[in-house]
């Protein structure tokens, strides 16, 4: 199994979600509002500053756990639907998942 974490612009979430609904056997996704900074951080910005003065950018984080063979299709949809061509379109990270445990039953599963 793999975990896909995608950080995208907020206004692209609906379009990405609609695209992901077409993926057969996708069991779901989680969405979290996040904020942070990337390469576009102001030059010369202090290393130490408070939240009130920080220039954070708001994004949405999508988390999906899926079978290995689904990764390419899911990533392609996210790239296609989240792309604006502008700086800050986001990032996608893919990690291995050792196991999934259903809280309801306590059973280990291969499908998340």
Image (spheres, rainbow, N blue to C red):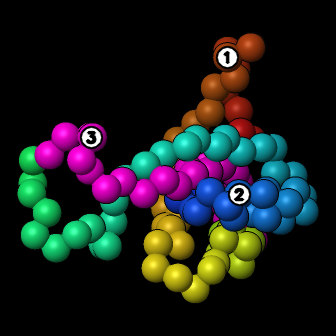
Marks 3/1: CA distance?
A: 36 Å
> Going 58% across and 41% down the picture, which residue do you hit?
32
The front one of 38 and 105 is: 38
Name the residue carrying label 2.
13
Image coordinates for residue 7, horizontal then vertical, percent: 53, 59
Q: Is residue 16 visible?
A: yes
Tell me if mark 3 has few (under 14), some (14-19) or many (20+) residues whose alpha carbon lies within 10 angstroms of its own. Answer: few
N-term-proximal mark, 2 vs 1? 2
Q: Which residues are magenta?
A: 49-74
Q: Is residue 39 left or right of residue 33?
A: left
Label 3 element class: loop
Nearer mark to the viewer, of 2 and 1: 2
Image coordinates for residue 89, horizontal then vertical, percent: 53, 73
Name the quarter where the C terminus is drawn: top right
Label 2 element class: helix
The dot on residue 103 is: 1
N-term-proximal mark, 3 vs 1? 3
Image coordinates for residue 64, horizontal then vertical, percent: 65, 49
Marks 2/3: CA distance?
A: 25 Å
Marks 2/1: CA distance?
A: 28 Å
Is 91 magenta? The answer is no
The front one of 65 and 31 is: 31
The dot on residue 51 is: 3
């Amino acid at each position: 199994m793999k975990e896909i974490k995608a950080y995208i612009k907020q206004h692209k979430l609906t379009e990405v979600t609609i695209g992901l609904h077409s993926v057969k056997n996708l069991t779901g996704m989680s969405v979290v509002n996040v904020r942070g900074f990337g390469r576009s951080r102001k030059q010369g910005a202090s290393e130490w500053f408070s939240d009130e003065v920080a220039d954070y950018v708001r994004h949405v984080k999508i988390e999906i756990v899926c079978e290995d063979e689904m990764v390419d299709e899911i990533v392609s949809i996210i790239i296609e639907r989240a792309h604006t061509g502008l700086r800050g379109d986001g990032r996608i990270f893919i990690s291995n998942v050792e196991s999934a445990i259903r809280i309801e039953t306590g059973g280990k599963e291969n499908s998340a």
